[in-house]
Amino acid sequence: MKLTICRKEHFNAAHRLYNQAWTDEENEALFGKCSNPNYHGHNYELTVKLTGTVDPETGYVYDLKKLSDLLKAEILDRFDHKNLNLDTAEFRHLNPTAENIAKVIYDILRPNIREDLEVAVLLYETERNFVEYNG
């Protein structure tokens, strides 16, 4: 029997969407107000989903407390209340779009979670704009 467990977290972060090789005018034409040179912020909602079989001894797919601790140590402490472009190594040269943020989060988490579990990252940038990445 396979089940999916989910842990939901949130973090606040600022960013600027832009391509460093382009002019300000080119960036504004594509990214609009999201390319504001003074940055802008989001209240991100993050859901991490783990899918696998239930351990008959524990009744768990994965210990949700352990997942909570992992998310705090590896994601929230790294990105919460940060300027993603300026304060994080991950986005110094990578455009911090929702797509790229979700993939970076997945790449950080995947080595810390058993290989027999499927991992998916669901990231809401706004109530209506979100992405899901599952490797």
Image (cartoon, rainbow, N blue to C red):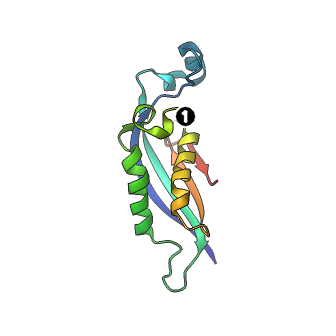
**Based on the displayed image, in which of its 4 quarters is residue 9 positioned?**
bottom left
Q: Position of residue 127 (x, y in %)?
A: 49, 43
In the image, taking residue 115 as reference, residue 85 lies left or right, namely: left
Q: Position of residue 105 (x, y in %)?
A: 51, 49
Q: Where is residue 21 in the image (x, y as percent from the top left)?
A: 59, 20
Q: Residue, x 58% and y 45% (percent of image)?
A: 131
Relative vertical location of residue 31 with respect to residue 5 in this rendering, above or below: above
Q: Residue furthest bottom?
A: 57
Q: How many labels does the image show?
A: 1
Relative vertical location of residue 92 with respect to residue 46 in this rendering, above or below: above
Q: Residue, x 55% and y 52% (percent of image)?
A: 106
Relative vertical location of residue 116 with respect to residue 57 in this rendering, above or below: above
Using a 10 Å C-alpha cutoff, classify the residue at mark 1 as few (fewer than 14 neighbours), some (14 to 19) or many (20 or more).
some
The amino acid marked with disc number 1 is: Leu
Of the 4 image quadrants, the one containing the N terminus is: bottom right
- Viewer-proximal residue among 27 and 89: 89
- Can residue 129 be seen by looking at this rendering? no
- Viewer-proximal residue among 132 and 94: 94
Q: Position of residue 101 (x, y in %)?
A: 53, 42
According to the picture, the residue beneath numbered tag 1 turns out to be 94
- Can residue 106 be seen by looking at this rendering? yes
Q: Residue, x 58% and y 60% (percent of image)?
A: 119
